[in-house]
Amino acid sequence: MAGIKDVAARAGVSVATVSRVLNDHSGVREGTRTRVLAAVSELSYRPNTLARSLRTDQTRTLGLVISDVLNPFFTELARAVEDEARARGYSVIIGNADEQLTLQDHHVRTLLDRRIDGLLVSPADGDSLALREAALAGIPMVFVDRWIAGLDVPLVRADGRSAVRELVAHLYALGHRKLAIIAGPVASTTSNERLAAFRGALAEHGLPLPGHYIGQGDFQTASGRRVTEGFFTLPEPPDAVFATDNLMALGVMEQVRTLGLRVPDDVSLAAFDDIPWFLHTDPPITAIAQPTQQLGHRAVTALTDLVEGRSAGSVTLSAHLIARRSCGEDERTRR
């Protein structure tokens, strides 16, 4: 799909001139206007109606596209976004990408056609044409939790690297030496960061991370079960598993029980993204918790700053480890 830069290049004019033609501004020579409109037709360029409306009026409505509404982390994030937006006089329309890039881009384009004032996105994995077009068109937009490399969009996130290091130190102190990880999708920025932090923390303790101790998941419960089943076909199964999201951790626990084993007697378990359920599982699950409400509030603050003509920069908060009995320790909390 052609972008506004492609139209400008085909017509031999600047992006600003293309914008003036599309917005029917005066002061453009008729020959130039004709070339631009011909380029638009030849390239089947679809102008973004919201990009024009944002320059003239506001709907007091924000769009939020989250990766998976069934994931309690994103459910809580959406609630925090709604609360903060309402306090600032905005409404929120939510789209659930269900971890699918095509569905995410459908929601993005639908929200833009609804003339929202700005867009909050926790991107599904992979490159997104719709988000790149929105960024190029100057749509007020903020990434939250996840991001797309190379796009100049403010990001509000929690840095979990120090908490991952603390988790590995905690497991090491408990005597674990065969540590495995279930990563998320290969293109996931958050998964890759957590995997790198885990690998680096193991190296600090002189521990390797062999390939057979790296499971490839997709942030869904079924992949946690599948990878765990594979781990326990190994000649030396791991004695601790770190799932890089909460749903995969629940899959680990389900599969361990299916195999007739127990957490933490046969294998310890820890997760990224604490959720209320983890307090009520047997045993309660050790987890790295993100400040979800703060993420939602700060993301809305950044987006409304952009919508209202102010500047907005990226925000990095900190995650923390909550140690529970799934790693074999007594119940206690580390913050």
Image (cartoon, rainbow, N blue to C red):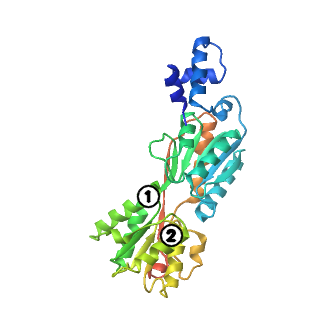
User: What numbered label is drawn on residue 122?
Assistant: none
Q: Secondary structure at mark 1?
A: loop
Side (left or right) of 269 relative to 72: left
Q: Residue furthest bottom?
A: 260
Of 245 and 279, nearer the camera is: 245
Mark with earlier residue (1, 2): 1
Report which residue position mark 2 lands on: 223
Q: Position of residue 150 (x, y in %)?
A: 44, 42
Q: Amino acid at mark 2?
A: Ser
| Residue 322 x, y percent position in the rendering | 49, 71
Residue in the picture at 29% in, 66% down: 204
- The answer to whether residue 217 is seen in the rendering is yes
In the depicted view, which residue is nearer to us: 334 or 55? 55
- Residue 3 in percent (x, y) is at 54, 33
Residue beneath the point at 61% across and 22% down: 37
Q: Which residue shows up at 33% across the image and 68% down it?
A: 211
Read off the residue under disc 1. Answer: 186
> 10 Å neighbourhood of mark 1: few (<14), some, or many (≥20)?
some
Judge by depth and name the residue closer to the eye, 3 or 96.
Answer: 3
Does residue 286 appear anywhere in the picture? no
Residue found at the very far front of the displayed protein? 42
Residue at mark 1 to residue at mark 2: CA–CA distance: 14 Å
Circles 1 and 2: CB atoms closer than 8 Å: no
Placement of 59 over or under 259, stated as above or below: above
Q: Position of residue 103 (x, y in %)?
A: 61, 52
Residue type, mark 1 in image: Val
Secondary element under disc 2, as helix, strand or loop, is: helix
Instruction: Classify mark 2: residues with Cα within 10 Å, few (<14), some (14-19) or many (20+).
Output: many
Report whether 269 appears left or right of 95.
left
The correct choice, above or below, for 290 with respect to 50 in the image is below
